[in-house]
Amino acid sequence: MTIQRDEVLKIARLARLELTDAELASLGDDLNKILAYVEQLSALDTTGVPSLEHAAEAGDTWRDDVSRPSLPRERGLAVAPAVADGCFQVPKIIE
Amino acid sequence: MEPHSWTIHEARERLDNGRITATGLTRSVLARIEAVEPRVAAFNTVCADMALEQAAAADRRLQAGERGGLLGIPLALKDNMITQGVATTCSSRILKNFVPPADGAMAARFKEQGAINLGKTNLDEFAMGSSTENSATQITRNPWNLERAPGGSSGGAAACVAADMALAALGSDTGGSIRQPAALCGVVGLKPTYGRVSRYGLVAFASSLDQIGPITKDVADAAIVLGAIAGRDPLDATSSARPVPDYSRGLKDGIKGLRIGVPREYFIDGMDAPVADAVRAAIDTLKGLGATVREISLPHTRYAVATYYLVATAEASSNLGRYDGVRYGHRAMDARDLLEMYMATRDQGFGPEVKRRIMLGTYALSAGYYDAYYKKAQQARTLILKDFTDAFGQVDVIATPTSPTGAFRLGERTADPLQMYLSDIFTISINLAGLPGMSQPCGVDGNGMPVGLQLIGKAFDEATMLRAGWAFEQATAFHKAKPSL
């Protein structure tokens, strides 16, 4: 199966990546090559085989519900690209 | 021998005897960095002043009678582990100016133990790569041949240890990123069992695979560093509460009767013959030391790379969603609205390999393809783990090559992403199965470049793997070879 340019564009939008035409073309080629390689998995019979999400031995772990100090606001904001009124500032969201 | 070329255990003895101070040791290492770093380019950041302050603090603790552990030992951190007040870039433009507001678990552990943090080592951007050439900061060179790649993604960490610019370093390993560069640079690299070491403050790539571990000059040092960083951390829910053994204690117990399995699928067509020969000779050495060797089969090995590149990229596409230009890191400044800002920020901030993997992962998770790709890969992962579980019913340790070739030339594999992915063919399964694995030097290839022997242990049985590796070192001198720089 080969993915076409419009599908590459759709994936890029889902991934929030604005790609140039050149990037769309080369990434499309790369993806098709990689997908052709991973296609070999379809030869593997996995009927009735459960999924393995991770190899951790513990399942969910719990801690006591005790409050502890979090990062002070000014230290959290100090690394932000833009700040206003003690908040992260972003471009206009609503018209 | 200059102090910078010591192992941790050699330095430990001298620090504890008062024959050298932490400051003296740190000065020796900093002088070494000044002398060879311009040629090797292993570090994104060197923290000389901070290191000397930490050395002075370590000397005060030594004077007060404190001993052992990592106290006074100069080490380096891969630049994907957050450090308060010291830039943490992941070798990405998107984090170019990111100075974390807090320490991760490893930086915190260094401070508690009195280790000296020399700085942050180069990596493939977000640890995605096998040569460190995907770094947005610089090209790190292999200390054994400056025209060759150090491997990756922890290429800076492996190169800095091989070049005696740190006594040891911490790397991270998602598909081989500690073991493969350790093999290519002729040092020891250990990926612990999934859950053995806290990943709090490790910038996430693929969370079901990522694990932190040591890169050291010998196996005894790997045991020391692993013991110092392992253990439960309430800030990492995947970290195990199992007690941490004293990994140094059992090292010398010998390997008489140890059952070593050699998987036939790991000696493949197209593999570099001198690499296969060196690894087979190493297995003979282990046999000569009293181990019993038998051939085993891990039949799903050939599906590992495909499985990995679906699982790892799916997780990466989700983990890297956080780089949106809002809270930290790079932001595209001329965007008119939020969506445009996200898209332009990520286009400007990420390099080609990161984009490639985000795209592949997004595709594998997208509606209509999830079952064919992501779910299929997770089922294959079950079968790969079962291969190991079955094998470990018969053997205690598995021995393989770490990488099918020695260090390749810079630029040689950058044009073909798939060829680069195949560099990790022998290391990837171990991450998928969550097992511990260690690479150590066992010879040279036809170009005079180091070859790595990989030992794989049962889950949480790093001790047996270390014991076998230590026995091999005692019988050989490969770990003592140093590049001339």
Image (tube, rainbow, N blue to C red):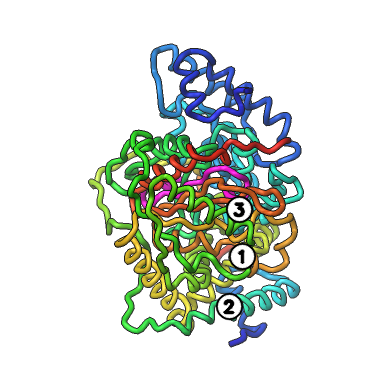
In the image, what residue type sits under mark 2?
Tyr
3 and 2 marks on the same chain: no
Cα–Cα gap, marks 3 and 1: 19 Å
In the figure, is residue B344 to the left or right of B297? Answer: right
Q: Quadrant of the C terminus of chain B?
A: top right
Decide: few, some or many residues near mark 3? Use Cα within 10 Å; few <14, some 14-19, many ≥20: many
**Where residue B347 sits: x, y (%)?**
66, 63
Is residue A85 visible in the rendered image? The answer is no
Badges 2 and 1, same chain: no
Q: Residue B233 location, x and y as percent?
A: 34, 43
Q: Is residue B451 left or right of residue B454?
A: right
> What residue did someone put label 1 on?
B271
For badge 3, the amino acid type reads: Gly
Q: Which numbered disc, 3 or 1, marks the residue closer to the eye?
A: 1
Mark 3 highlights which residue?
B152
Q: Secondary structure at mark 2?
A: helix
Nearer to us of marks 2 and 1 is 1
Residue beneath label 2, please? A37
> Pointers 3 and 1 in contact (CB under 8 A)?
no
Alpha-carbon distance for marks 3 and 2? 22 Å
Label at residue B166: none
Crowding at dot 2, Cα within 10 Å, few <14 / some 14-19 / many 20+, comes out as few
In the rendered structure, which segment of residues is drawn in magenta? B181-203
Give me the residue at 58% from left, 44% from top: B79
